[in-house]
Image (cartoon, rainbow, N blue to C red):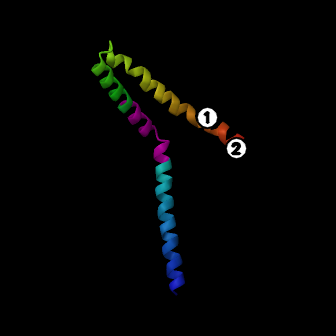
Amino acid sequence: MNNVINLESRLSAIESRNKKVELDKKWEGSVTRKILLMIFTYLSVATYFVAIGVANPWSNAAVPSFAFLLSTLTLPFFRRIWDNRNK
């Protein structure tokens, strides 16, 4: 009887962990996460540009922010290539 209870407990823990992992994966690929990271990148770069005296810091900060967004959009493509070569 203890074995059944132990197995049920372990199965419940595994299912709980799987739900968390699935949610983490969903978040990693979400548009919300990408937009938030783009905004935070823009704000931090713009603030840094202001601090070091770059001309037009708020408009110049858009370049690295969009570059970051572009990199996140192209990574799945390169991941598929990498996966195919490493199967």
Please say if the residues under marks 1 and 2 sit with CB atoms less than 8 Å apart.
no
Foreground pick, 70 / 54 = 54
Q: Residues within 10 Å of mark 1 (few under 14, many from 20)?
A: few
Residue type highlighted by circle 1: Phe
Secondary structure character of the magenta stretch overall: helix
Asked whether, in this view, residue 82 is left or right of residue 42, the answer is right
For the magenta stretch, what is the residue range? Answer: 26-39
Across the whole image, how many numbered discs are drawn on residues?
2
Taking the spot 35% from the left edge, 17% from the top edge, the residue there is 59
Note whether 20 is above or below 37 in the view shown.
below
Q: Quick one: SS at disc 2?
A: loop
Q: Is tag 1's residue or tag 2's residue first in the polypeptide sequence?
A: 1
Note whether 68 is above or below 31 in the view shown.
above
Note whether 24 is above or below 73 in the view shown.
below
Residue type highlighted by circle 2: Asn
Q: Magenta stretch containing residue 35, yes or no?
A: yes
Estimate the x, y position of residue 73 in percent, counting from the top left: 53, 32
Identity of the residue furthest to the bottom in this view? 1
Estimate the x, y position of residue 41 in percent, counting from the top left: 38, 30
Taking the spot 30% from the left edge, 19% from the top edge, the residue there is 52
What residue sits right under mark 2 in the picture?
A: 86
Q: Quick one: SS at disc 1?
A: helix
Q: Residues within 10 Å of mark 2 (few under 14, many from 20)?
A: few
What residue sits right under mark 1 in the picture?
A: 77
State the CA–CA distance, disc 1 to disc 2. 15 Å
Note whether 12 is above or below 23 in the view shown.
below
